[in-house]
Image: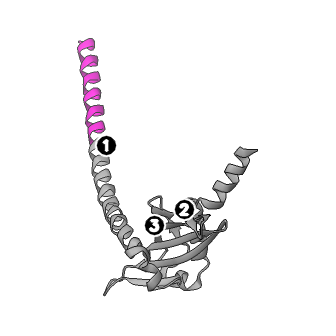
Amino acid sequence: MSLLKGLYIRSRITINPDKVYRMAMTKLNTSAGILEVMGAPLTGTVLRAYVMSGGGLILKNFKPTVRSKRCFLIFPIQGSERKGLVSVEVKKKKGQYDMRLLAVDIPMASGPDQRLFLIGDEEEYKVGGGLISELRDPVVKAMAASKEFDDLDQIEEEKDAERELQEAERKHREEIEKLEKGGS
């Protein structure tokens, strides 16, 4: 019985980043404003970064209390028209997910990125000393690197195909030489 109690308590206080991602994607795909700007359908990627904070026991008024946990999540998103970078902050209170921030940064051809808020505002974006913006930099670098990696993979595939073709031609010549030697 104590195992079940432990699992129940754990489920009430832990945050599942995959669930947060699915919640964010649902809200984004049902937002007319975001869909209008980015184009439907919106798709995410496997590239995600998150940080957990809070949780644990503290003494509050001489009583042990469980601190709320927070999850800060950032991931790229793509619509039919534009790409963007999603920032999410979720707090778990009394077993329930409470989304505090849901924002999308959309790179613009001219001028600075446009930040659209579905939930929260610029103040919420700066919570935790700007933790979301700190998470943003490595994800942006990873997104840029993925394009470079795709290009490198393409070059490697072309070289591999060329090597395979040369190997097949060499084997074919050897076969012909064997046949010619055997025939004379």
Of 36 and 121, the residue lying toward us: 121
Whichever of callouts 2 and 3 sits on the residue coming sooner in the sequence is 2
Residue type indicated by callout 3: Phe
Instruction: Read off the residue under disc 3.
Output: 75
Q: Which residue is at a point 27% across and 51% down the rendered structure image?
A: 155
Q: Residue at x 49, y 74 (%)?
A: 80
Residue 161 location, x and y as percent? 31, 43
- Residue 119 visible, this orientation: yes
- How far apart are the alpha carbons under marks 2 and 3? 23 Å
Q: Disc 3 on helix, strand or loop? A: strand
Q: Which mark is residue 161?
A: 1
Q: Vertically, is 36 above or below 154?
A: below
Quarter of the image holding residue 123? bottom left
| Picture quadrant where residue 108 is located | bottom left
Callout 1 amino acid: Ala
Mark 1, Cα crowd under 10 Å, few <14 / some 14-19 / many 20+, is few
Between the residue at mark 1 and the residue at mark 3, the CA separation in whole angstroms equals 34 Å
58 or 20, which is in the foreground?
58
Magenta residue span: 161-184
Query: Looking at the picture, how far across and down is residue 160, in whole percent?
Result: 29, 42
Q: Which is in the foreground here, disc 2 or disc 1?
A: 2
Q: Amino acid at mark 2?
A: Gly
Q: Nearer the viewer, mark 1 or mark 3?
A: 3
**To which residue does mark 2 refer?**
55
Q: Which quadrant is the N terminus positioned in? A: top right
